[in-house]
């Protein structure tokens, strides 16, 4: 390998290390890049976690360490797009499966399929996109925050139900 190429490789390696890439920890201030295949590309405004937290008026439950993407979400109740009505969404990885947890201020709605309770929190399911996808999402609310969980990849409905129960056990319905 030529000397100039070796120096280029070394500087690239050092630059990536100095930026924190490869550490496994996303920077809370990193500017996200928008991929049109991303879950939130047409559902919200993709933004760094720290920015998103400053643009909502409630304290959300943060679902995992491996957050792939964070987005500000428009109000689910059709209200004005102001800090008090905005929601937040997290695309994340848990047990090698991708999920999206969305949360908004206010009391939630129940889906048509009751899944029972977990730690006193009523869980219900609904058909995603009017039943055309063959998959279901899970809804729950603690009375002040409404939550919605869906698969971002090919996770089964059973996996989504199990993940919703896990999140509630960890405090997503307090």
Image (cartoon, grey):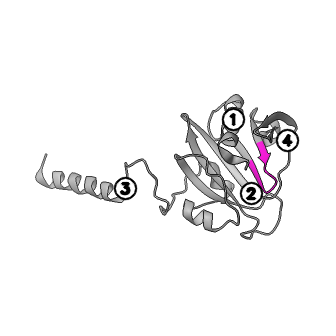
Residue 111 got which mark?
A: 4
Q: CA distance from mark 3 to mark 1?
A: 32 Å
| Disc 2 element | strand
Residue 160 got which mark?
A: 1
Question: For the residue carrying disc 1, how many other residues have a C-alpha within 10 Å: few (<14), some (14-19), or many (20+)?
Answer: many
Residue 127 got which mark?
A: none
Please say if 75 is above or below 168: below
Q: CA distance from mark 3 to mark 4?
A: 42 Å
Q: Position of residue 123 (x, y in %)?
A: 79, 39
Q: CA distance from mark 1 to mark 2?
A: 19 Å
- Mark 3 vs mark 1: which is more N-terminal? 3
Q: Position of residue 42 (x, y in %)?
A: 67, 55
Q: Is residue 146 magenta?
A: yes
Q: CA distance from mark 3 to mark 2?
A: 32 Å
Q: Mark 3–mark 1 contact, CB under 8 Å?
A: no
Q: Mark 4–mark 2 contact, CB under 8 Å?
A: no
Q: Mark 1–mark 2 contact, CB under 8 Å?
A: no
**Which residue is denoted by mark 3 in the rendering?**
20
What's drawn in magenta, residue-wise?
139-147
**Which residue is denoted by mark 2 in the rendering?**
104
Q: CA distance from mark 4 to mark 2?
A: 16 Å
| Disc 4 element | loop
- Mark 3 vs mark 4: which is more N-terminal? 3
Q: CA distance from mark 1 to mark 4?
A: 14 Å
Q: Quadrant of the N terminus?
A: top left
- Mark 4 vs mark 2: which is more N-terminal? 2
- Mark 3 vs mark 2: which is more N-terminal? 3
Q: In the figure, is residue 54 to the left or right of 149?
A: left
Q: In the figure, is residue 167 to the left or right of 141?
A: left
């Amino acid at each position: 390998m030529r000397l100039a190429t070796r120096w280029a490789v070394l500087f690239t390696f050092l630059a990536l290390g100095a930026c924190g890439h490869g550490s496994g920890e996303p920077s809370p201030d990193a500017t996200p890049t928008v991929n049109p295949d991303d879950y939130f590309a047409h559902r919200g405004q993709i933004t760094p976690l720290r920015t998103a937290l400053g643009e909502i008026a409630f304290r959300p439950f943060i679902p995992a360490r491996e957050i792939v993407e964070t987005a500000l979400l428009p109000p689910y109740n059709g209200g004005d797009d102001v800090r008090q009505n905005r929601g937040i969404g997290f695309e994340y990885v848990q047990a090698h499966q991708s999920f999206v947890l969305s949360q908004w201020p206010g009391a939630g709605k129940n889906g048509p399929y009751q899944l029972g309770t977990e730690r006193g929190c009523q869980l219900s399911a609904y058909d995603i996109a009017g039943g055309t996808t063959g998959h279901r999402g899970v809804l729950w609310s603690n009375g002040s925050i409404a939550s919605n969980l869906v698969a971002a990849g090919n996770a089964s409905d059973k996996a989504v139900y199990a993940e919703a129960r896990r999140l509630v056990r960890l405090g997503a319905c307090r």
